[in-house]
Amino acid sequence: MNDIPVHIQEQFGYCFEDIEVGMSASFGKTVTEADINMFAGVSGDTCPIHLNEDFAKHTRFKTRIAHGFISASLISTLVGCRLPGPGALYVNQEIKFRKPVFIGDAVNARVVVRKLIPEKNFVELDTTCEVDGEIVVEGFATTWVPSRDPKD
């Protein structure tokens, strides 16, 4: 990638050799009713706790909640677009859903590099999503990241 102009190179994400333990990236989004409806359409998850207020008011949350994977998908945004970025491939993601996310909540996703595994070009990331400073999703991901100089 050394011959590629910097403004183009940035679109390719980080090479394994450029990543260091402690590096981090964040991405935030406010969850809307449209997000919930589109996610239900794409995923097929039409559980009434997400889509039907009359049903949801009889649950422990007393109102509709967002699909947990809407928040978790913000982690995917970071992996694929920011850190490690384009070129990285998911190998594994472990997720714990700690609290519900409601329509109108601003979710902030964050990844932090916790470990490098050079023999496999794996980068391990701590992953979290927060709403108002409280963790709603946490876990870790393993990604494969291309080298600057591909191995033969």
Image (cartoon, rainbow, N blue to C red):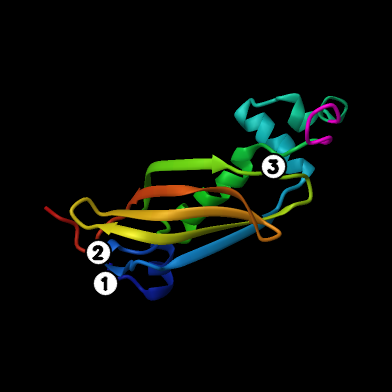
Q: Quadrant location of residue 107?
A: bottom right
**Picture quarter with the N terminus:** bottom left
**Is residue 62 on the magenta stretch?**
yes
| Helix, strand or loop for the magenta stretch, by majority | loop
Q: Amino acid at mark 2?
A: Arg
User: In the rendering, at what x and y percent does residue 13 appear?
Assistant: 40, 62
Residue at (19% x, 57% y) in the render: 150
User: In the rendering, at what x and y percent does residue 73 appear?
Assistant: 56, 45
Mark 2 and mark 3 lie on one chain; the one further toward the N terminus is: 3
Q: Are marks 2 and 1 in contact (CB under 8 Å)?
A: yes
Q: In front: mark 1 or mark 3?
A: 3
105 lies left or right of 1: right
Chain part drawn in magenta:
57-63
- Secondary structure at numbered mark 2: loop
Q: Amino acid at mark 3?
A: Pro
Residue ID for mark 3: 100
Residue at (33% x, 68% y) in the render: 20
Residue at (11% x, 53% y) in the render: 152
